Image: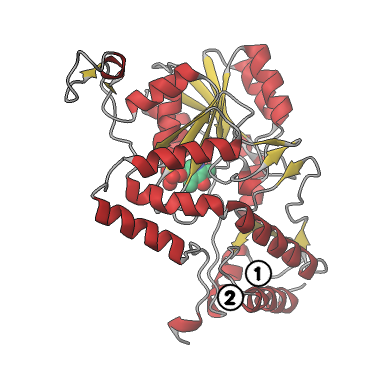
Amino acid sequence: MNEENFLPFALPSLSEDEIEEVVDSLRSGWWTTGPKTRRFETEFAEFVGAKYAVAVNSATAGLHLALESIGLKRRDKVITTAYTFTSTAEVVRYFDADPVFVDIDERSLNLSIPGLRDALQRETGVKAIIPVHFAGQPCEMDSIHDLAAEYGVKVIEDAAHAFPAEYKGRMVGTLSDLTVYSFYVTKTIATGEGGMVVTDDEDLANRIKVMRLHGISRDVFNRYTSEKPSWYYEVIAPGYKYNMPDIAAALGIHQLQKAETFRRRRAEMAETYTAAFADLPLRTPLVEDTTTLHAWHLYVIRLDLDRITIDRNRFIELMAKSRIGTSVHFIPLHKHPYWRDTYHLKADDFPVAERVFDEVVSLPLYPSMSDHDQQRVIDAVRAILSESVR
Ligand SMILES: *Cc1c(COP(=O)(O)O)cnc(C)c1O
C-alpha cells in the first residue's frame, strides 16, 4: 500500500489559467477585494441570469447575510431540512432565531414537501424556508414557492451543491428571493473558500454588499464624488468581514468558465456509475428527475442493508483498503449533540433521514478523475458488494 495510488474522495480541477490569474493578482497588489472580484460577480450573475451577484468568503457567510437582509430577528423561525451540513442551520442561531427541521423525501433526499406543509401549519413566527438541493438535484421548487406564498415567507436556497443546475428549464439562482452558492474546495467550482449570493432584488443586494464589509456605505461617496474626498465613508450598521479576496476570485473566474464542461463530465461519470451498479444490492440510486438538470456535486449510493452482510461503516473501511476515499452526506443534524439537545430532536421525528443515513456512501466524482480512476471505484464497489450478498 502506498499513498500514490490512493484516490481521494474529492479534488479541485486546476489548470494553468487559474495559476496565471492568481499570479497576476499577486503581482498587481490586489490581494483583497478588487477588480477580479467585481468581474467574477458580473460574470457569475450573467451565467445564472440573475440581476445581482455578491461575492463573499463562504456560503456560510452568504447564508448569514441573506437572513440578515430579510430582517430575521430573535425568536423568528426558519424551516430547513435535517439532512444538510450544519451551516444551513447555524446561521439561524446567529440571530438567536430557531431552525425548524423537516424530514426528507425518500427518493430525492430533499426537503419533504408534506413535512414542510406540516411545519408551516404548526409553527408560528416562520420567516423563511431554506431548501437545500441535495447532491445538486433541485428541490421541488414550485411546491416550495406555493407554500411560501401561502404563508408569506421568504425562500433562500442553499445551492452549495447546485451549481450549475436547472429546475424546469430555469437556472437555480433565478427562482427564489435569494440563492447562496459555495466555492469551498470540494464543491463543483472552487476558490478554496468562497461563496456567492444572487438575487434580483436591488435592496437585498445592496444590504448584503454593505453588511459583507463592516456595514460601510460608500453611496455617499459615489453620489457626491465632487464634494466628498475618496477616503470618506460612513458606517451605517455593525457589519461583518465577509468579503472575497481577488486571489480567490482569480480562481473563480476560470472555474466559472469551465463550470458547464465540469458538469457534463460529472453527469457522464454519474451515468457510468449508475449503469455499472444496476445489478448490485443497492437501493434506488438517486435518480435524476426529468424536470431538472442535476449539478451532480455528489454521487451517493444507498446500500440495501437487507441484502448484504456488512454495514455502511464496514463498506467504507473496505473501500479505504482498496485505496479509495469516500464520504458520508450527511450526518443528519438531529443526530448532532448541539442540535439534538437544544431542540430536543428525536430520531422518530426524522424516520427517512434516520434510515437513509445508515445506507449512504458518497463516491468520488470530479472532472480530474480519469476513466481508469472511475473503473477502480466501480471494481472496488462491485467486489465488496458481491462478496457480502446474503
Ligand atoms: C458546503 C456546504 C455549505 C457551506 O459552504 P461554505 O462555503 O464552506 O461555507 C453549506 N451548505 C451545504 C449544503 C454545503 O454542502
Look at the image and tell me whether residue 57 can be seen: no
Q: Disc 2 and disc 1: Cα gap in Å?
A: 10 Å
What numbered label is drawn on residue 147? none
Which numbered tag is attached to residue 310? Answer: 1
Q: Which color scheme did the rendering employ for the protein?
A: secondary structure
Q: Which residue is mark 2?
A: 318
**Relative height, residue 296 to residue 317 (above, below):** above
Figure check: 208 above or below 109: above
Percent position (x, y) of residue 72?
Answer: 43, 18
Whether residue 254 can be seen here: yes
| Number of other residues with Cα within 10 Å of mark 1, as a class: few under 14, some 14 to 19, many 20 or more | some
Q: Secondary structure at mark 2?
A: helix
**302 above or below 241?**
below
Query: Where in the figure is residue 110, as x and y percent of width and height?
Result: 66, 40
Q: Residue type at mark 2? A: Leu
Nearer mark to the viewer, of 2 and 1: 2
Relative placement, left or right, of 163 versus 237 is: right
